[in-house]
Image: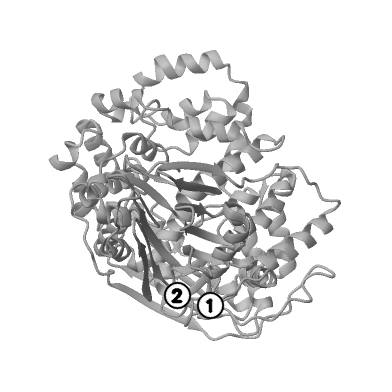
Amino acid sequence: MCGIAGIVGRNEDVVDASDVHRMCQAIVHRGPDEEGIFVKDGTGLGMRRLSIIDVEGGHQPVFNEDRSVWAVFNGEIYNFVELRAELESRGHHFYTHSDTEVIVHLYEELGPECVRRLKGMFAIAIWDESRKSLLLARDRLGKKPLHYAFSNGRLLFGSEIKAILAIAPELAVPNPEALLQYFYFGYVPDPLTAFAAIRKLPPGHLMEYFRGSLKERCYWDVPAYGSAPPQSEEECLQILESKLAEAVRIRLMSEVPLGVLLSGGVDSSIVVALMARASSSPVKTFSIGFAEDRFNEAQYARVVAERFGTEHHEMVVDPNLEETITYLTSMLEEPFGDSSMLPTYFVCRMARQKVTVALSGDGGDELFAGYDRYAVAMQRRHLDGFPQWAGRLYRQRLHPRVPVGVYGRNYAWNATLNWRDRYLDGVTALPARDRERSLFSKDFLALADRLPDPLQQFQDYYDNTPGAPDDLSRLLYLDTKTYLVGDILTKVDRMSMATSLEVRVPMLDHEFVEWAAGLPIEWKFRASTRKYLLKRLAERLGIPAELLHRPKQGFQLPMEQWLRGELKQKFLSILTEPRTLQRGYFRPDALRGMVDEHVRGRRNRTGMLWRMLILEWWHRNYLEGEARHRTPPRLEFTERSTAPAPPTTMQSAPGAGTDWKQTNA
């Protein structure tokens, strides 16, 4: 796991190695072990390395036999051993034992199409000296980030925007279209960033820079939904177990300590069960909890740990909130409104004390319809008969006249929409162009009305879902292309890398994703049971029923109480400072009213207020220069470690899971 960065200039340009070094220093947290730089004429490649595979010899950048191809790489390639054997049989010579070197030789054979052979998570930059071209590529699901920009005739790229801003601070100009998207979704969806001149390379895409021009194309997408129905439930479960077990097994490849982030939910519990079966030593599991019982899932994680005999580490977090939030908002170079970044950071930081690599259960909700909002969408199907003309009349004429504080106001808006737009409305918080116009200033509304509709990209994903899918499968595809990438995987990448921890995600193995997409929706959502097939697998693996049929909690924290308690004076007051109000986004009276409504306990405005706070911190950190190197916050952990006990006997599908190689975890 690493962070990468680089510069490609015009032919007459000379790249200074000190510039590449400054880019790397901005992302040193992604790779604290060493730095590597290649500079030649108008090209510079740099990387920060977190040593995991070929710890002694896998230095980057890597090169081919005649040093005409150079690469830097962030991620892991899980099939590199097989690829290496194939390439050696074709005459290629290797000087390391790393997965990175496979990439340069595969590029020699296949050119840009080499990325189709890679199985793993990656952001890659390959410099072809003979063609004077740069190839940038990002993995299929977007587990690893990659940003790029033009500045003074040079192409700049980096794992994080901070690397680009380190040598091009003039690019710190806000992108109004991206900020409008942030108000809607709480993150900035690909390909935009919060900075006008900087973009993200979307997942499953590659880009070539040749003779001053960029050409971008898609090399992978989720295949047709519902196109491969199984013969029976037994067959379906056997395939599910086999494929997911293999996805877990190949992610145990490591020369450094490895564990699992265990929440006690269905997905992470399945990963623990399969990892315990594939490992010759007790699995290390990590969970966190909070003092407030309704936000504490530690007891469920403890049940799983005991069930599978793991070496369990459980910590109750007493965070220094001011230090933690100040630190994390300076690390995030875009506004990011998902407050679950805090517990994600806490568990990653705790795990990093014991291991360098951890597996997680992310991805199961998007693949198998696990979110509450899918059930809500299905429950509201009875609203489909609402006349569209009447809905338009309400939204255009009546809704603006309903006072903001009236209960049911937003539900009434939502009820008048069609199925697709009703769902999209449900996943937006501050849609400035329609439902929440009364909160925003006239000047910002005038700007927003001239910008592209933030919902259009999401509507296009829904309308163009591969295959001939049902409506719910369209929602799964939509969330896979947007929420999974822009929120979940961004959160996991940034928070884990802030602690120099690599996180691997078995359920987002692209071959497993392709198989899961092909399942008809009734294997995912059946009679209001979400994750139907995953829960059936969990039962076979021996995961206790009390974990499988409880309400989904997610990675939550007591933010509502914090914003009415210890954070109230320190942070909520920021929103009503003249400095904040002068940004011009909100009507001052509307913003003050929302803060007052929350503090008095009349309405829970936690989500909206948190997003506004994050936006203001972003302004101060990245547009006004207050971001600076900060040391990680002090955290008080009360640890409860559980020595591994012999796991109870696990069930498995007949004929499945009996011949796996034992791997040290």
Q: Nearer the viewer, residue 618 or 92?
A: 92
Say if mark 2 contacts mark 1, CB within 8 Å.
yes
Q: Is residue 593 left or right of residue 638?
A: left
Q: Position of residue 142 (x, y in %)?
A: 52, 53
User: Residue at image x 46%, y 58%?
Assistant: 129
Q: Residue furthest left?
A: 578
Residue 396 to residue 30: above or below: above
Mark 2 residue element: loop
Circle 2 sits on which residue? 59
Residue 378 to residue 619: above or below: above
User: Residue at image x 34%, y 53%?
Assistant: 161
Q: Position of residue 417 (x, y in %)?
A: 53, 25
Q: Is residue 558 left or right of residue 360?
A: left
N-term-proximal mark, 2 vs 1: 2
- Quadrant location of residue 597? top left
Name the image quarter holding the C terminus.
bottom right
Kind of residue at disc 2: His
